[in-house]
Every structure is written in C-alpha cells, then in structure tokens.
Image (cartoon, rainbow, N blue to C red):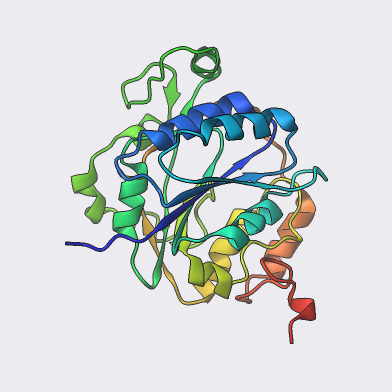
Amino acid sequence: MQHLPKISLIATTYNWPDALRLCIESIGRQTLVPFEVIIADDGSTDDTRTLIERMRKDFPCPIVHAWQEDLGFRAAEVRNNALRLCKGDYVVFIDGDIIMHPHFVEDHAKMAQPGYYVIGSRAKFNEKATARMLAGGAVQAHWYSPGISRRMNALYLPWLGPLTVGYRKSKPLYGRSCNMAAWLTDLYAVNGFDADIQGYGYEDTDIIARLNNLGLKKKFAKFRAVKFHLHHRQKEFVEANKQIFRDNLTVTACRHGIRNLDYVE
C-alpha cells in the first residue's frame, strides 16, 4: 500500500471571499482531506478573515490564515509566508478562486515522488457560469458542465494519467503555480518563490526553472488533479519581472525568498 505524504494545501487569495468560500467548500469534499489548509492572503480586508473564522469551525482539517499587509500584488511573498507555516511534508499550491474535482488532493498525494515536482492544468468557467455559482447556484464542475472552456482539461481519466506524465516535455518551463506540487524540502532548497517578483507574472515560471536547476524532474498531472478556475479579468504582466526571471535562469536558490540570503552566513 502506498504511503501518502502529509499534504499542506496553500491557496492564495485577495478580497474575493465569495470565490474563496466555493474553493474551501470543494476542499471539504475531497476524498483525501489535506493535513492542513493555509490561506495565503495578500492583504484582504476583514470580510475574508470573517469567512475563514466561520468555515474553520467545522472543517475536517486545520485552516491557517497567513495574512500580509496590502502593498500591491505580491503572490510570491504571500506564498513564502504560507511556506514558513507549513507543517506537512508535501505542498500543493492552488489559487483561492478554483473548484477542485473531489479526487484533486488524493491525485496529487499519489503522484508525489522524491526527485519530482508536479504540474497540473486547469479548465475555466466563463463569466456567466461563475456569476451563477457565486450567487449561490449549484456547483457544476464536470467536463460536460455548461459554461466551461478548455474542456479537455476537465476530463477525469486517471487510468490514462501514467501515460501522460511526460506531457509537454519539450517545454521545461511550462506550468502554473495555481496547480503545482512539490516536497517542502525541495521548496526550501530553492528558497521558495522570488519575493523580488512583484505584480503579475513570472513567479511560477521562475520557481519552475529553479526546481529544474535543483535537478528535479517534472510530472504532468494530465487527466488527474482536475480543477476549474472561476472567471476573472486577466491581469497584465509586469515587464520588470521578466528580467528577474532571466537573471535566475542559472541559479537554484533566489536571494529573497523564504529566507533573505543577503543575511544568511
């Protein structure tokens, strides 16, 4: 019988408690409940704190609220804040505006293997379907549900998964941190996300490059670890982040991450 790791599930959020509620509810429906849930909060107001306090009362695992001051979009740093609090040994990253297939956490746990990290894909709800669910409508998160794009990514066919672990092998930097998993020790080895990356873009590509530099191999969770992203307006990439990413292409540990290496002996 496979020994499954203790999963720390990290969900980023910012001032969208209605979406976070749907996300947390989908965590509660998992076939394998994570060891802990850490909400990486990039400076939300008290509405988010109130939601978390209400939902954690009867939740099947601990929910930790890792809040940082609102100083602009700082997804890298808020994930590092969450990593500092992790008590599990394997970390799954999501965004706080997704709905997970009931086997999402279990799939990631079963794919965990020393020497590897895992990247998954995402299906997307359109604006109409998102508005309906946020207003209290029934959650319909299946490949055949109305209002879904990237429908191929919504297919749950786990028996095909082992045949696709090398999917997009020709693109070593491909992946998104909204569906990503790695061992906590490996994330510490690369010093987490580069906190110098602020504003939207490149924080996930950057850490993927450094995990590669660490010598890890990538698995792709095709037809497994299925998730559905709620609709929101796409942010614009911050051009300055591209240069930080390029500067890190040959390094393993960023200087300003979980630890500030400028001050480490």
**Taking the image as drawn, is residue 232 in sight?**
no
Q: Which residue is pictured at 29% across the width and 56% down the height?
A: 110
Q: Nearer the viewer, residue 149 or 79?
A: 79
Q: Which residue is pictured at 67% across the width and 55% down the height?
A: 76
Q: Position of residue 15 (x, y in %)?
A: 70, 31
Left or right: residue 10 versus residue 151 is: right
**Taking the image as drawn, is residue 185 in sight?**
yes
- The quadrant of the rendering that contains the C terminus is bottom right
As drawn, the residue found furthest toward the front would be 57
Query: Does 134 sit above or below residue 252?
Result: above
Q: Which residue is pictured at 59% across the width and 59% down the height?
A: 85
Within the image, what quadrant is residue 152 found in? top left
Q: Nearer the viewer, residue 15 or 155?
A: 15
Left or right: residue 252 versus residue 113 is: right
Query: Does 158 sit above or below residue 262?
Result: above
Within the image, what quadrant is residue 231 found in? top right
Q: Which residue is pictured at 23% across the width and 55% down the height?
A: 162
Q: Nearer the viewer, residue 242 or 219?
A: 219
As drawn, the residue found furthest toward the right would be 71
As drawn, the residue found furthest toward the bottom would be 265
- The quadrant of the rendering that contains the N terminus is bottom left
Within the image, what quadrant is residue 232 found in? top right
Q: Position of residue 192 (x, y in %)?
A: 61, 65
Left or right: residue 221 versus residue 76 is: left
Q: Position of residue 50 (x, y in %)?
A: 65, 30
Q: Position of residue 229 (x, y in %)?
A: 50, 32
* Number of residue marks: 0
